[in-house]
Image (tube, rainbow, N blue to C red):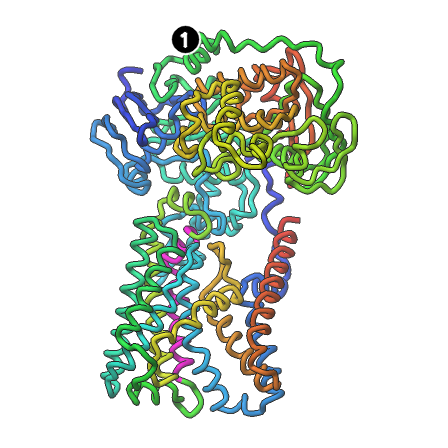
């Protein structure tokens, strides 16, 4: 491989946002004709690297070269002109435009007088769809497409630029089958393109890629030939040796005999088609699902944030009506919810961290109905130690804390409420590995002391290591329930996607 | 590729009439256009003079300033922003017209240029503040609005002055005995819009309004789209001020104040989504015309002018409810 032409050479690139270091001394070499995997946990720096390669952000230090020439893109358009195209993880399609218009952004096909011609744009779009085997109408509006169709369109748009370097960021997140994509990738590499393939699905990576570069905490840990390493090796590179060893699943206490504290019967409403579940005392019950399968509605319904058409919820065996998080908190042993969007749904950025933590119980810790800052701080200190949040942060405005520390503070707040049932929605999204460890420890000790936890996570390894049982949601229903040794990544992926393969074509 | 790849989702075309009906009703402009026709019929029923040339000219002269202002506002709203500077620019152009009247067609042209320059400059400032310095559009344009209002008061501290006769007579007149010039000017703006619709910049405007991140990742220059919207809007506010001066023939430093609420009402009534990415300048123009027509209808129907506001507000809310209802029905229909 070393003799092959170097299509893209990233050398010692660093990028920091203020005090937060996103990338440090990252190097990666893409050869023409190879599929190169970029691996790393969430927050390892993959998306920052993608942004740098696209000219969305510029590195503080380091050099990029393409085919020996310096490469310093200042915009996506310039990156594309130099031959770098990307299918973004968050999908960069404009919802109110048609498929054809999206395919020809930012410049549409022109007719007479240099004006945009809808017909020519559609024809051009249809030709692209046809060339890449995508059975979509070029006049369909993107907002009306399914997630999988949008994902395919995003991929097609990147391929349609005929790039020399193609970046695919989690291209299969919404795809049930990979045959179509892999076929296109192989055609492109055969024609001499280099592909940077970002995915958390190791099986796919092994099938498609020759080499992999691993990032951890913003640093490149190394580049390896995938033939020469085991999954365990890669795993260790991604999370670090000591933590990899700790990744053993916790022993399941014979929890199945404990009383159920939260029961949901045939919940229907919004994107929930029919969901029943039983959460027991001392149990961590996992929820896994691809994006948008009803998990969000489930969590929100359980605290009364999303309306239900039918179904019943029982807390401590008694039927309850949950009309909002405040009611949920006071019901039975108490249900506390940690929402996904901490910026918009969680924190009050201008208030001190301590105030944020004690907010739900602020009436309880005052003196004669008045808020006391000292009591507030003492109370916050108690629960912040449980989540390993350093007490020195308590007096800062929470908006100034890092994402990881904000998340710890929010978890502390959920525990501060005294609720014995926690609903945690992707509690480690976008936080670093160290914070994850603290959050895992806090969740475990909470369950160990008899609390019950319902945990949704977008990261399968996290579910594998934390939960006692795991429910897989698909299309608003519980598709599978796994327990014991069945909770491993392979079975989970099969359950997440195996069902998707049977999705009716409608 | 594989057979199960959702081939069924390609929308089957219905009958032509149904397609046209759906497009008219979901366009936003369609609903308000129907409303306008209904109101006009009502007006003609109560007041026979509505159908005469002078009746139509009156309506047109009345509606043109608001229609032009709403047209400008729709550009900013489509790109997901709010522009409050409209009332400031209208006031400023009006006092300039009344303080420095320039006679004859040449003078009118110079006056028009001055109004457009004022509006364009304020729009450029708004664009820089919002698109480049990334201020919230309400805050930034509130600032420029207050600035313009202040400037208008400095130029003219109390209502007064006279707009050049040529402007106030010619621009409120008709040509060929039936066609109001103010209406032609609005039509010219609509024609420009129809051309603009077929440019990459206009598509960028809609894209930025719907999803700024996706638009920029698709290679669209968000800054350019935003600045274009604000400058275009400013130019149209300047033109609105010019036409308002022709209509009132006098100056008033607070002439633009009623425009603030009414432009937004017209834009919303015209089916332009205030959350961005959907709507059309034509809808906003018809929305403005409808609001002005409603005043006439109520007057000719013998309703006291104190009640005008109540009716205007109610009609606006109903039209929006109806429009969004149809949109929801159409989209569930398309998905089913």
User: Callout 1: residue from which chain?
Assistant: A
* Residues shaded magenta: B181-208
B7 relative to B184, above or below: above
Res. A198 in view? no
Residue A301 appears at what percent x and percent y?
67, 37
Say if the magenta span includes residue B200. Answer: yes
Q: Is residue B197 left or right of residue B330?
A: left
Residue B36 appears at what percent x and percent y?
56, 75
B170 relative to A384, above or below: below
**Residue at screen point 53% across, 63% down:** B271
Residue toward you, B142 or A506? B142
Residue bearing the label numbered 1: A228
Magenta segment's dominant SS is helix
**Residue at screen point 44% across, 9% down:** A233
Q: Element type at marker 1? A: helix
Q: Residues within 10 Å of mark 1 (few under 14, many from 20)?
A: few
**Residue at screen point 29% across, 59% down:** B125
């Amino acid at each position: 491989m070393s003799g092959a032409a170097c299509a893209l050479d990233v050398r010692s690139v660093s990028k920091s946002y203020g005090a937060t270091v996103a990338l440090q001394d990252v190097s990666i070499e893409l050869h023409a004709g190879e599929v190169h995997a970029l691996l790393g946990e969430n927050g390892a720096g993959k998306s920052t690297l993608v942004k740098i390669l696209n000219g969305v952000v510029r590195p503080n230090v380091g050099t990029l070269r393409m085919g020996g020439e310096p490469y310093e893109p200042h915009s996506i358009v310039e990156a594309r002109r130099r031959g770098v195209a990307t299918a973004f993880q968050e999908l960069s399609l404009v919802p109110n435009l048609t498929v054809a218009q999206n395919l020809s952004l930012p410049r549409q096909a022109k007719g007479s007088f240099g004006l945009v011609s809808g017909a020519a744009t559609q024809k051009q779009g249809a030709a692209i769809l046809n060339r890449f085997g995508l059975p979509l109408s070029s006049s369909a509006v993107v907002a009306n497409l399914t997630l999988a169709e949008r994902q395919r369109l995003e991929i097609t748009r990147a391929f349609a630029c005929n790039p020399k370097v193609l970046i695919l960021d989690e291209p299969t997140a919404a795809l049930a089958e990979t045959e179509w994509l892999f076929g296109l990738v192989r055609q492109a590499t055969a024609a001499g393109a280099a592909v940077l393939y970002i995915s958390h699905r190791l099986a796919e990576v092994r099938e498609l890629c020759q080499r992999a570069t691993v990032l951890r905490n913003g640093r490149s840990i190394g580049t390896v030939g995938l033939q020469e390493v085991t999954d365990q090796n890669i795993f260790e590179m991604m999370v670090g040796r000591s933590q990899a060893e700790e990744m053993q699943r916790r022993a399941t206490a014979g929890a199945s005999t404990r009383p159920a504290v939260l029961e949901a019967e045939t919940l229907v409403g919004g994107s929930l088609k029919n969901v029943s579940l039983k959460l027991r005392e001392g149990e961590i019950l996992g929820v896994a699902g691809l994006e948008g399968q009803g998990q969000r509605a489930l969590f929100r319904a359980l605290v009364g944030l999303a309306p239900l058409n039918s179904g019943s919820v029982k807390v401590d065996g008694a039927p309850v009506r949950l009309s909002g998080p405040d009611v949920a908190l006071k019901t039975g042993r108490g249900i506390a919810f940690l929402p996904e969007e901490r910026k918009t749904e969680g924190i009050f950025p201008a208030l001190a961290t301590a105030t944020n933590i004690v907010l739900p119980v602020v009436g309880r810790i005052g003196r004669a109905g008045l808020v006391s800052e000292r009591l507030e701080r003492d109370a916050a200190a108690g629960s912040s130690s449980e989540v390993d949040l350093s007490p020195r942060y308590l007096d800062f405005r929470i908006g100034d804390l890092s994402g990881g520390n904000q998340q710890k503070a929010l978890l502390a707040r959920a525990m501060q409420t005294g609720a014995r049932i926690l609903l945690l929605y992707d509690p480690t999204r976008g936080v670093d590995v160290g914070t994850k460890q603290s959050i895992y420890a806090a969740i475990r000790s909470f369950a160990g002391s008899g609390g019950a936890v319902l945990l949704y996570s977008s990261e399968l390894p996290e579910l594998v290591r934390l939960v006692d049982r795991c429910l897989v949601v698909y299309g608003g229903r519980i598709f599978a329930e796994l327990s014991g040794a069945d909770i491993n990544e392979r079975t989970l992926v099969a359950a997440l996607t195996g069902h998707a393969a049977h999705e009716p074509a409608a | 590729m594989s057979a199960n790849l959702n081939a069924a989702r390609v929308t089957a075309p219905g009958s032509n009439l149904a397609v046209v009906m759906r497009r008219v009703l979901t366009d936003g402009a369609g609903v308000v256009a129907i409303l306008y026709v209904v109101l006009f019929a009502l007006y003609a029923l109560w007041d026979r003079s509505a159908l005469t040339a002078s009746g139509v000219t009156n309506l047109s002269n009345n509606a043109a300033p608001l229609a032009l202002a709403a047209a400008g506002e729709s550009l900013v709203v489509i790109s997901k922003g709010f522009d409050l500077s409209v009332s400031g620019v209208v006031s400023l152009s009006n006092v300039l017209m009344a303080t420095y009247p320039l006679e004859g067609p040449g003078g009118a042209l110079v006056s028009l240029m001055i109004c457009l320059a004022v509006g364009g400059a304020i729009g450029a400032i708004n664009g820089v503040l919002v698109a480049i310095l990334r201020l919230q559009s309400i805050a930034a344009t509130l600032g420029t609005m207050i600035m313009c209002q202040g400037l208008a008061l400095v130029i003219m501290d109390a209502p007064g002055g006279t707009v050049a006769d040529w402007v106030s007579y010619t621009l409120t007149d008709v040509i060929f005995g039936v066609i109001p010039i103010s209406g032609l000017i609005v039509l010219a703006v609509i024609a420009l819009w129809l051309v603009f619709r077929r440019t990459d910049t206009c598509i960028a405007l809609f894209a930025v309004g719907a999803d700024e991140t996706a638009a920029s990742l698709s290679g669209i220059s968000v800054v350019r789209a935003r600045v274009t919207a604000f400058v275009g809007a400013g130019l149209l506010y300047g033109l609105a001020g010019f036409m308002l001066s022709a209509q009132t023939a006098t100056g008033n430093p607070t002439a633009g104040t009623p425009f603030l609420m009414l432009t937004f009402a017209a834009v919303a009534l015209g089916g332009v989504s205030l959350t961005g990415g959907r709507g059309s300048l034509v809808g906003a123009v018809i929305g403005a015309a409808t609001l002005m027509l409603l005043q006439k209808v109520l007057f000719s129907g013998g309703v006291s002018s104190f009640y005008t506001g109540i009716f205007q507000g109610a009609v606006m809310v109903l039209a929006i409810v109806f429009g969004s209802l149809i949109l929801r029905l159409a989209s569930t229909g398309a998905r089913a």
